[in-house]
Amino acid sequence: MLKLSESLIGRPVMSLRTGQSVAFTTSAIINPDNLKIEGFYCTDRFNKKELVLLYQDIRDVIPQGLVVNDHDVLAEPHELVRLKKIMDIGFELIGKQVVTLSKQRLGKVTDFAAEVETMYVQKLYVSQGLLKGLTRGNLGIDRSQVNEITDKKIIVEDPLNRASVPAGAAA
């Protein structure tokens, strides 16, 4: 099932053992090579330290937050040696510029949807700016349309030019 970023980020991390919140997610740790959410930075409810929740420790995503077995699944960032390279990149998806292969600017990423079973980002939602946004609305881009991700932008395939096909044309 797809979940928008707002149902994953800024949400409580709930313990199955105690039935209470043990932390709050603050941001996602996204691997820019494959758009996989490797985990989440969290603020510990008890001592306000920054901890990391790995995606494989999430039991479920419910309206109240993310469900884990207990507080002890949260780790300090320096303990996660395998994720160090990805965490050092500090990749942020929201706010990233989106352009096509033909260098046409589409806008900026305002939201994303991830598959909760695999934690792969499946859809990017792009705001086209004030003038284009009023006439066309937001764009939804599937992960299969993403061609390349750089530090500054996401390059996607050119959308089909639908204006060249008349509305009543028969196939």
Image (spheres, helix red, strand yellow):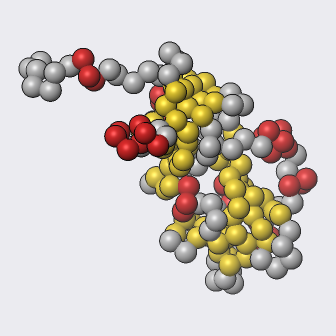
Q: Is residue 24 above or below residue 165?
A: below
- Residue 68 in the image: state x and y as whole percent: 66, 69
Q: Which residue lies furthest to the right in this view?
A: 78
Q: Can residue 72 be seen in this view?
A: yes
User: In front here: 151 or 74?
Assistant: 151
Residue lying at 32% horizontally and 20% vertically, measured from the top left: 161
How far across and down, in percent of the image, does residue 16 sit? 64, 77
In the displayed structure image, the side of residue 159 where residue 3 appears, left or right: right
Above/below status of 23 relative to 19: above
- Give the residue at x 79% y 72%: 44
Front residue of 40/170: it is 170
Judge left or right: residue 120 versus residue 137: right
Q: Which quarter of the image is occupied by the C terminus?
A: top left
In the displayed structure, would residue 150 be above or below residue 91? above
Q: Along the horizontal axis of the image, is 69 left or right of 127?
A: right
Is 165 positioned to the left or the right of 71 in the image? left
Split into 4 quadrants, where in the image is the N terminus?
A: bottom left
| Residue 150 found in image quarter | top right
Vertical placement of residue 59 versus 46, above or below = above
Q: Is residue 123 visible in this depiction of the protein?
A: no
Q: Which of 112 and 18 is in front in this view?
A: 112
Residue 96: give x, y in percent of width and height: 62, 38
In terms of image quadrants, where is residue 43? bottom right
Q: Residue at x 35, y 39 (%)?
A: 136
In the image shown, does 60 or 22 lie closer to the viewer?
22
Residue 126 percent across, percent down from the top left: 49, 41
Which residue lies at the image location 81% right of the left edge and 62% below the top edge?
Answer: 51
